[in-house]
Amino acid sequence: MELLEKRIQEDGVVKEGNVLKVDSFLNHQIDIGLMNEIGKEFKRIFADTEVTKILTIEASGIAIAAIVAQYFDVPVVFAKKSQSINLDGSVYSTRIESFTHKRVYDVIVSRKYLSSEDKVLVVDDFLANGCAVDGLIDLINESGATLQGVGIIIEKGFQDGGKRLRERGIRVESLAIVDEMDHKTGRIVFRH
Amino acid sequence: MELLEKRIQEDGVVKEGNVLKVDSFLNHQIDIGLMNEIGKEFKRIFADTEVTKILTIEASGIAIAAIVAQYFDVPVVFAKKSQSINLDGSVYSTRIESFTHKRVYDVIVSRKYLSSEDKVLVVDDFLANGCAVDGLIDLINESGATLQGVGIIIEKGFQDGGKRLRERGIRVESLAIVDEMDHKTGRIVFRH
C-alpha cells in the first residue's frame, strides 16, 4: 500500500534491535485519516471473504480493528491481557509471549463473543515473530470459529511470523512488508 | 442518549459491588454501529468547540477515541500504561489508581504528541471515581495544552468523579448517567 509505505519512510524511525517506531501515526498518536484508508484497503483485499467478527488484541490493535470493522459492518472483539487467569470456564484462554515487553501474558476472550458460527478476520498493527497472531488463532480454534484471514498493517519480513503462518495455509495480507531496515542509516526496504 | 440508555437496559448486567458490565457492546465486544452513533453525538455536543487532539487511555478508551476522532477529523493520542517509568524526559507522566484492577499505573504520553498549542477533548468509556480522567488532565496540564472538555459514554452518577470534575469548572458531557443500579433486581435508573 503505497500511501502507507510512504508514511513509514517519512515518519517511521528505525531503532537498534530491529525496532521500527511508528508512534507518530499508528500506535501512540493515531492518524485516523490514514487508518480509514487502511480500513478500506483491507475491505478491498478481503471483499469476497465472509466475515462475522473482527478479532484483535489489546491495546494497539484496537484502533485499527474499530476502523476496519466499519467497512465490514461487523462487531470487533478484542482479546484481553489478563493478570490472573479466570478459572470459571467462561473464557477461552491462551498464553502469548511478548518480545517487546519480555514477558508472558495470559490472554482471554469471553465464550459469549466467539462461537463455532463465527467467521473471523484477525487484524493487528504489527506482525514480527507471530506470537500474538498464534495466540489469537489458538482462541479461534478453541471456540470452533473459522479463521478467514489475517490482516496486518506492517509485517517485519525478516522475522519468521508471516512465513510460518503462510506455511500453515493461513491467508496473511500485510499492507507493508519491511524486508530490511538499518538503524544507522534509517534505510527501510519494502518487499514488492 | 436514548439509543445508548436502551442498549444499557437491554444488554448491561449489574453485578455486586456497583459493577456495570457492558462487555457485549462496549468494551470487549464492540458494536461499531453504536460507536458511530456515539461519535456523532459527541460531535453534535462539542460542535462549537475547537479540538486538535482526542486524548484517551488504553485499552478500552481506544475504540471510542478512534471512532470519535473521525467526526472531529483530528488525531487520537492514547496514554500508555507503563510498567517502568521512562526517565529520559521524553514523556509526560502521572500515576493513576485503578479501583477495578486494584493497582497503581504509571501513565505516559510522549512529549511529541501533546503541546501547548493543542486543544484537547478527553474521551473515555466510563467515569466513576474519575481517577483516569484526573490523570489525563495532569498530562494535559504538564504539556501546557488546553482541556476543552471531557466526553464520557457512561458515568456512574452515584460515584463522585463527575461531580468533582464539574466543580473544578471542567465541561463533562456524559451520554448516559446511571444514578442507581441494583444487582439483585437488575434495575438501572438514569439521570434525566
Image (tube, coloured by chain):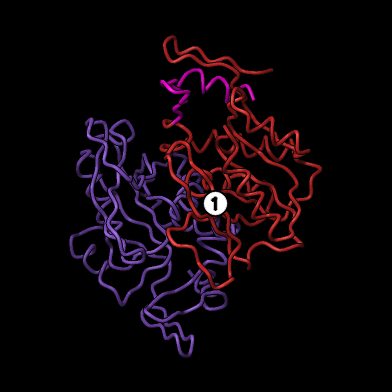
Chain colours: A red, B purple
Q: Which residues are magenta?
A: A1-22
Q: Residue at x 26, y 52 (%)?
A: B135
Percent of width and height locating residue B23: 53, 66
Q: Is residue A90 magenta?
A: no
Q: Is residue A96 left or right of residue B115?
A: right
Q: Is residue B110 above or below residue B37?
A: above
Q: Chain of mark 1?
A: A
Q: Name the spot of residue A4 as percent of width and height, x first.
A: 57, 26
Residue B72, placed above or below residue B98: above
Q: Looking at the picture, how far across and down is residue B100, in whole percent?
A: 36, 66
Horizontal side of residue A152 vs B66, given as left or right: right
- Which of the image's four quarters has the C terminus of chain A? top right
Residue to which mark 1 is pinned: A95
Q: Nearer the viewer, residue A70 or B91?
A: B91
Q: In terms of depth relative to the viewer, which is nearer, A14 or A103? A: A103
Q: Please give left or right for residue A56 compared with residue B191 in the image.
A: right
Position above or below: A8 against B7: above
Q: Write the residue at 45% across / 79% down.
A: B15
Task: Reply above or below: A102 against A17.
Answer: below
x then y, percent, for residue A136: 62, 49
> Can you tell which quarter of the image residue A11 is in?
top left
Is residue A4 one of those drawn in magenta? yes
Of all residues shown, which one is farthest toward the top?
A185
| Count of numbered labels shown in the rendering | 1
| Dot 1 crowding, Cα within 10 Å, few <14, some 14–19, many 20+ | some
Please, what is the three-letter code of the amino acid marked with disc 1? Arg
> Considering depth in this image, is A85 or B82 the residue closer to the camera?
A85
